[in-house]
Amino acid sequence: LALVSNAIDELRSTQSPEVKIDINSTNAEVIITIEDNAGGINKKNLTKIFEPYFTTKEDGSGIGLYLSKLIVEESFEGKIDVINKQEGALFTLFFEKSFD
């Protein structure tokens, strides 16, 4: 939810706002991607956005993406990545399938 909420915040100044959510799976994992067309994340901030209390928002707490990463990694033993694409940011979440 934090990823989608952040995308929506950034899309407020975008001409034709769009958020794409895609869910795929392989035999080994589930992959969720969330992509927007809000222009991407400043390159100097890409390595910092998952740090606690780091924010670029005037009224932000900097805790949303940190908690998202913590939940994905600690609670679900997954992985979260972010890259800039041509039109915006692309977050990818990876979750191993459990066969217990």
Image: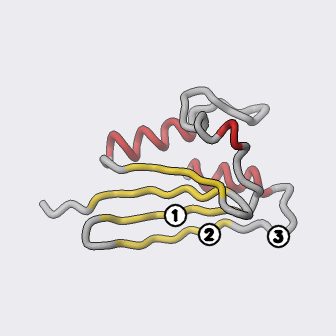
Name the amino acid, label 1: Thr
Give the residue pinned by disc 3: 16
Among the two numbered marks 1 and 3 on one chain, the one whose residue lies closer to the N terminus: 3
Among the two numbered marks 2 and 1 on one chain, the one whose residue lies closer to the N terminus: 2
> Residue 21: image x %, image y %?
56, 68
> Dot 2: what SS?
strand
Give the residue pinned by disc 2: 20
Give the residue pinned by disc 1: 33
Which one is in front, 46 or 55? Answer: 46
Gap in angstroms between the C-alphas marked 2 and 1: 8 Å
**Number of other residues with Cα within 10 Å of mark 2, as a class: few under 14, some 14 to 19, many 20 or more:** few
Gap in angstroms between the C-alphas marked 3 and 2: 13 Å
Where 16 falls versus 47 (above or below)?
Answer: below
- Seen as rendered, the residue at the extreme top is 53
Q: How is the image coloured?
A: secondary structure
Name the amino acid, label 3: Ser
**Number of other residues with Cα within 10 Å of mark 3, as a class: few under 14, some 14 to 19, many 20 or more:** few
Where 18 falls versus 10 (above or below)?
Answer: below
